[in-house]
Image: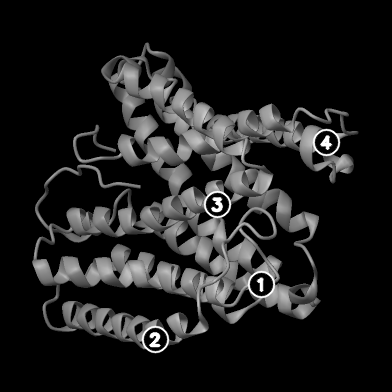
Amino acid sequence: MATIALPAARVRAESFWLFSRRLDLAVFLGPAVASALLLLLGWRLGLFEADASPEWVWVPAVLLVDVAHVWSTGFRVYLDGEELRRRPFLYALVPAAGLASALVVFQFGAAAFWRALAYVAVFHFVRQQYGWVALYRGRRREHDRLGHWLDSATIYAATLYPLIYWHAHLPRRFWWFLPGDFAPGVPEAAASVLEPVYWALLASYSARSLWAWVVLRRPNPGKDIVVATTAFCWYAGIVALDSDFAFTVTNVLIHGVPYMALVYVAGRRRAAEAEGALVGRFFALGAAPFLAALWAVAYAEELLWDRSVWLDREWLFGAGWDLSGLEFVIVPLLALPQVTHYLLDGFIWRRKARQI
């Protein structure tokens, strides 16, 4: 996620937050606390040794958060006629180019397709955490070079070091999309060399944050929450624990929940500007219809995936279809919402975009 413009404001208590104190704590700190509690529950239930996450975890975490948040990009763009008219070629070209690229890559085999998609997703996940830090820096009007360098280096270390550790210790008992989607070959020494850098950056960030709180009296609590929760969830879910359950509950909640909140808040503000437009009428209905719509399309997408490709959740989606030989078309088509989300996310929140 790239940075966007926030209104310049006199520094005051409420300017600590992107949305509001209550909402920021709910969507940035809340998912990390939920992840920690789920890890404790999983430990007590012995779920770390299971081959896959139980269905009661998969439904809320993957279906209702991970898949649903992908579709929120469409609500942010394709429901808004003004936004579509502002950049029509971009919003037509991205899905068209994404589908064409997916069809081409799949010609090299399913393994090549899922590996390519995994790395695009990883880039998106990493950049989103950096984007939140940049938003909080802009909100607090932090423009010093040292702070920018340390904040950037720390959030990238909090995400990239666990990924390098993962690559250096393949195979793990979990994966991004499918087994083998990450490329092997990274030596363990790479992770060993980077580990002290990782801890040094976290310690330096913590010391500088403490100085801002105690001495300068100019804290940035939202940014600190993003850095701390990212470091905790990525380290616990990837480095400390070798478990599909642990990776699932730490990976998707802190990523998807804040993003859906961002789209909803942006949509509500657009609703105030465009009352008669489709986007205005939709977001004026409130959070419940927004979430219900996201969950409905997420369920429809996963139903198509399961009936045509995965065939492993008949209890939820019904019996599968025999579409043998059509995977080269079906898989790229079904992956198109993800691809579009990953690509458009790099454009719609840039500084020259509308304010949230």
* Separation of marks 3 and 4 at Cα, in angstroms: 25 Å
Label located before the other in sequence (3 or 4): 3
Q: Can residue 221 be seen in the rendering of this structure?
A: yes
Q: Position of residue 7 (x, y in %)?
A: 16, 43
* Separation of marks 2 and 1 at Cα, in angstroms: 20 Å
* Separation of marks 1 and 3 at Cα, in angstroms: 15 Å
Left or right, residue 309 beside residue 150: right
**Residue at point 64% right, 53% down?**
177
Label located before the other in sequence (4 or 2): 2
Label located before the other in sequence (3 or 2): 3
* Separation of marks 3 and 2 at Cα, in angstroms: 25 Å
Residue type at mark 2 is Val
Local crowd size for mark 3, using a 10 Å CA cut-off: few (<14), some (14–19), many (≥20): some
Q: Which residue is tagged 3?
A: 118
Q: Which residue is tagged 4?
A: 317
Residue type at mark 4 is Phe
Residue 82 vs residue 20, the one in the foreground: 82
Q: Quadrant of residue 179?
A: bottom right
Residue 308 vs residue 216, the one in the foreground: 308
Q: Position of residue 168 (x, y in %)?
A: 54, 76
* Separation of marks 4 and 2 at Cα, in angstroms: 46 Å
Q: Which residue is tagged 2?
A: 193
**Residue at point 31% right, 24% down?**
272
